[in-house]
Image (cartoon, rainbow, N blue to C red):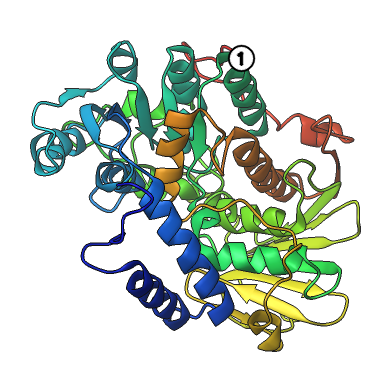
Amino acid sequence: MSSSSPTPRGNLSRRGFIERSTLAMAAAGLPLWFSRQEAHALVQEVSGQGKPDGLTMGAIGIGSPQSRGRAIYNDARKNKLMPVRYVAACDVDARHLKRAIETDLPKNGDMNAKGYSDFRELLDRKDIEALTIAPPDQWHALIAIDALKKGKDVYLEKPLTLTIGEAIALEKVVAKTGRVLATGSQQRSDRRFRLACELVRNGRIGKVTRVECRIGANPKGTFQPSAPPEGLDWDFWLGPCPKVDYVTERCHYQYRWWYEYSGGKLTDWGAHHLDIAQWGLGTDDTGPISVQAIGEAPSGAANSYNCHPTFRVEYTYANGAKVIASDTTLPDTVGDKDTNGILFVGDTGKWIFVSRGKISASDPKLLEEPLKEDSIKLEVSNNHMENFLGCVKSRKKPICHVGVGASSVIICHLGVIALQTGKKLDWDPAKRVFAQEEGNALISRPMRAPWKLEV
């Protein structure tokens, strides 16, 4: 579609499209000035995007019908930027793989996709140009690094990696291979979060003194081992992690509540909300200088969820700002009391709160007054998957490139390490080391043979 097309959406005129888009965004709680600005930008984006050559893709880590693996390959198939064809899918659970190959992909037009139980065989295919990758966290770095080295571009579900050491390694491999890697922290492609961060970055609430990231508590539970379900390769699922008996609650969605495979809510919702805190503070290229944490100790019983059920993690930045990640709204909070979202507080006492459902402020005028023409403008993405696919074509960095993903996940892991050590830790964000050896001992983890990171 050319830039002169009068119908950017079906039979709507350009003017009608702008008006309807403006009203829709305003109805969603965005201020009118911002909605109008976004609508004008959107019509330009739609009119000029064109139809590049299609892309041949594969999916690794499918999961259940509600999983992110399934969601992101569907996002890729539904994109409006370019034709995408999935020719292969991989999962260590034969039930999930069967559904993808026989039902999901054919329903989207991919009739002859081949299924694999070993990701290495899929990655050996020369015809696959790009991948969506969404296995459990212990597999993120290993699979992504292998894919990058074999010339594939990668959309990697958040959190970027299981450890700080893996994040550093993944950055090195992206730099060495020149491939495109996008992290699935999709809140950076949400207008509410971008507006909140632009207002904060332009001093709308004064100097930021405190950011609250409310991310929810981790569940508790003790469970009994059992035989793995038919079709699940439990040993391969564990991969680089210690070999243990199968427990239903260790696998699939529930793996998030075991430190062996993830970081609990700190790497689940924290990978989203701490990422936005960093965006609002403008600290993607730096990070905190110290971290301390308190939390309810996990039970310690065999086969129990072992992430701290409740917690408060406090990060201190070089400019004095505090970022607090907690399981709920803090008793001493000001402003919006919602239990999930990000609250920015300034030295003026003014605040801005943002979540996936709303944006609010201590004074509505903080949102209603337009930013000046010469204000700080953040990178714009209104569709996270299309941002990645566009960068595959242009070879530019995605909005959540590997540096952003690494910076954000390192913050999450700092919190986990502070909880596990029970100590205040000093962090050098440039060298990416702790001043205390207890912290440095947890930057990386040993991997079960034969798996190892090869940078």
Secondary structure at badge 1 equals helix
- The answer to whether residue 46 is above or below residue 108 is below
Q: Horizontally, is 226 left or right of 299 in the view?
A: left
Q: Please say whether residue 133 is visible from this viewpoint.
A: yes
Is 289 above or below relative to 53?
below
Residue 414, image x and y in percent?
72, 44
Name the one closer to the observer, 378 or 237.
Answer: 378
For disc 1, the neighbor class at 10 Å (few under 14, some 14 to 19, many from 20) is few
Q: Is residue 12 left or right of residue 349?
A: left
Q: How many marks?
A: 1
Q: Residue furthest front?
A: 4
Viewer-nearest residue: 265 or 75 = 75
Residue 197, quarter of the rendered image:
bottom right
- Rendered residue at 22%/30% (across/down): 86
- The residue lying at 40 percent from left, 47 percent from top is 48
What's the residue at 63%, 57% (across, down)?
276
* Vertical placement of residue 2 versus 294, above or below: above
Amino acid, disc 1: Lys
- Location of residue 82 in the rendering, given as x and y in whole percent from the top left corner: 30, 38
The answer to which of 22 and 228 lies nearer the viewer is 22
Location of mark 1 (residue): 176
> Which quadrant of the rendered structure holds the C terminus?
top right
Q: What's the residue at 76%, 57% (across, down)?
A: 281
Picture coordinates of residue 401 (x, y %)?
A: 57, 37
